[in-house]
Image (tube, grey):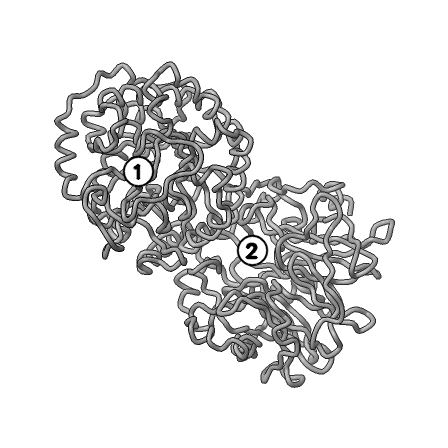
Amino acid sequence: MQKLLSILAWAAFAAYAAAAPKAASPHAETVPGRWSIDRVRAWSDARPWPVGANFVPSTAINQLEMWQAETFDPETIDRELGWASSTGMNAMRVFLHDIPWREDKQGFIERIEQYLTIADRHGIKTLFVFFDGVWNPQPRAGRQPPPRPHVHNSGWVQSPGVAILRDPGRHAELEGYVKGVLTRFADDPRILGWDLFNEPDNSNGRKFAEEMPPDEKHERACDLLLATFRWAREVAPSQPLTVGVWGGFDWLDDPEPIESISLNNSDVVSFHTYDAANGARETIRRMAEATDRPLWCTEYMARGPNSTFEGVLPVLQQHRVGAFNWGLVDGKTQTIYPWDSWTTPYDAEPALWFHDVFRRDGTPYRSEETDLVRRLTAATNRPDEAPPAEAMSKADIRKGIEAHDRALFIKAGWIRDPYIVVGPDGDFYLTGTTSLREDPRQQSDPYNTGLGEASLVGWKARVWRSSDLADWEEIDPPFTLRDGVWAKTRPNRFKEIPERDWRLWAPELHWTGDRWALVQTSPAPVRGANLSLSAGKELKGPWQNPMGQEIGTRHDPSLYKDDDGQWWLIYGATLIAPLKPDFSGLAGDPVAIGPSGNVDKMGHEGCFIRKFGGKYVLFGTGWSTGRMRQGSYNLYYAVADKITGPYGPRKFAGRFLGHGTLFQDRAGQWWCTAFYNANVPPLGGSGIVSRDLSATAQTINQLGTTIVPMEIDFDDQGEPRIRSKDPRYAIPGPDEGQEFHATVAEEYEAR
């Protein structure tokens, strides 16, 4: 954590630290159970480069306000982690505290679980910190003090407080806290690791009368740190342990006992540096040579001393050192002010922010910094050694269509949510969530996820046409967000938000008998959907918006025409409502539908309906693990006798088929669209059936549009059974979190 020092006093402090007498070293021992170098290197190599911040929500002044029941703020946590994820950040360092555990063990665990669920939804792993030796040594439960105006971290507190830390006889009171949290989350893949003690012997510049003398604090911190390592090794979590070295920068040449304990017992070695680029580079070089272990820099980035994103982060990226800058959102910790704000008065926001990345409204303090984070994480975690593949040859696609026995990669190019429909002319029309045709990031950042501020999703519905699913011709974009209802009813939003930030998501095309209908959703410039009709049989404008603003914010809208001619609107996960014949509004109230049993939703997006043998089949999309962007992106289904339900249990339709849609070729054979949706480049299909993909979002689909052959038959009760004919897609992997009534593998083999 930040040292309570003015920038000008930094050199004097370093000199003092170097001149201070070394404490005796009875503590410099290694606790049994440390991971071997081979084990920790293999663990690290299997994971993305961790990049993120030291995180506390802007509404919390300290760890207690973050974690106590009365002030725990999941809405702010969700919003602010979303901003972090949009920059490419994938990890957060988060401080726990022993007081919430002692006050309410079960409630504290439940709040940690809630936090992890939110972070996981944003693709963020967490490095939890148990203890902290920095700032106020007398933490108290209950209402926390308001911030002192313009003072850096005026309310942060130590854990444990001085009364416990200075009394070795009371250290055992903390064993239940450490072991209780570790045991509950010891095998949780959402957790990156455990940082046992932050700057344990920090004397805090003697700013607190209650603080122990430096030598005494060092001694007692050594005692507690060794005990904590022992407690943690007894639990033996599946995540690595670490304690960062900091302060005097002589950790390797002449380490203090606290530094020896930290370096000799950490699985991943961590350190703090607020040096500029050259100093950080030299520290990394020497620590890498001395330890031969993965490194995490768990604190850096103080703009005053020239520890900046542009200077230090490229150095950390070059050496693949985990990077956690101090501070995410300007809030009650007030760490935009420098360390010297404790002694130097400030009366307004400093011209140069010391820490933090975002303002409270989510705008970056410096967009060039967030752009840099985005570029470096993309370049590192989506390496260019796996360039996008070319589509299959047209001849092979045509043969594959006829054989209908394996997946076919029919078209390369950046696309999500591909949707294929047959038009009135008999041709196939392909659309989906796409980039703008001229966007160069299709080449420079091909594995862009389409999410967050870095998204290359454009604002035009691009469409391709083919007579045989092999030879595709792009036609002029027939529809853009300018054609929808919101450009007409809320034009100011279209003026205020630049075009580069407009997003058109998940378009579908439907032939109504005399014209085209297009439905889609959008988060910006207006968060809303569109249901638009062409003027005639040609796929082009001018477009009408018969529902007007009644279409609202319905997510991933889809249309279905029943045998009686009634059109239905399906959206969310899942609501359904009949439409008026002219599409001018709903003809009835929406009805919530979904599977029966333990899984009450089809997933979280991409729901649509098809009908087989007189039965209605509701399809929906979810991640195999049940956690956002972790595992494979799958397609599920449930069956009903009536379109409004009730529907039966959720069944497995196909692995890697999430947000795919079913369509028929000219021979009446069924196919499902599929696309690349992952955090890493595509995997090879060999052995994929038995591979656990839960570590992150992964797929075998190449970047573009794949179609997968589907088999549809019926069981003894006349219920449709739906499965891919390609075994790589037909069987759920070991990361599948849902239990099915009969194993899909057995069904597949039986058929």
Q: Residue at x 53, y 55 (%)?
A: 677
Q: Which residue is mark 2?
A: 701
Apparent side of residue 688 relative to residue 592 in the rendered image (left or right): left
Q: Quadrant of the N terminus?
A: top left
Q: Secondary structure at mark 1?
A: loop
Q: Earlier in the sequence, mark 1 or mark 2?
A: 1
Q: Residue at x 82, y 70 (%)?
A: 563
Residue 392: quadrant of the picture: bottom right
Residue 97 % position (x, y): 42, 32
**C-alpha gap between disc 1 and disc 2:** 43 Å
Q: In this figure, what is the number of numbered marks?
A: 2
Q: Which SS class for mark 2?
A: loop
The circle drawn on residue 1 is: 1
Closest to the observer: 120 or 327? 327
| Vertical relation: 221 (above or below) 693 | above
Q: Position of residue 515 (x, y in %)?
A: 68, 81
Under mark 2, the amino acid is: Asn
Q: Are marks 1 and 2 in contact (CB under 8 Å)?
A: no
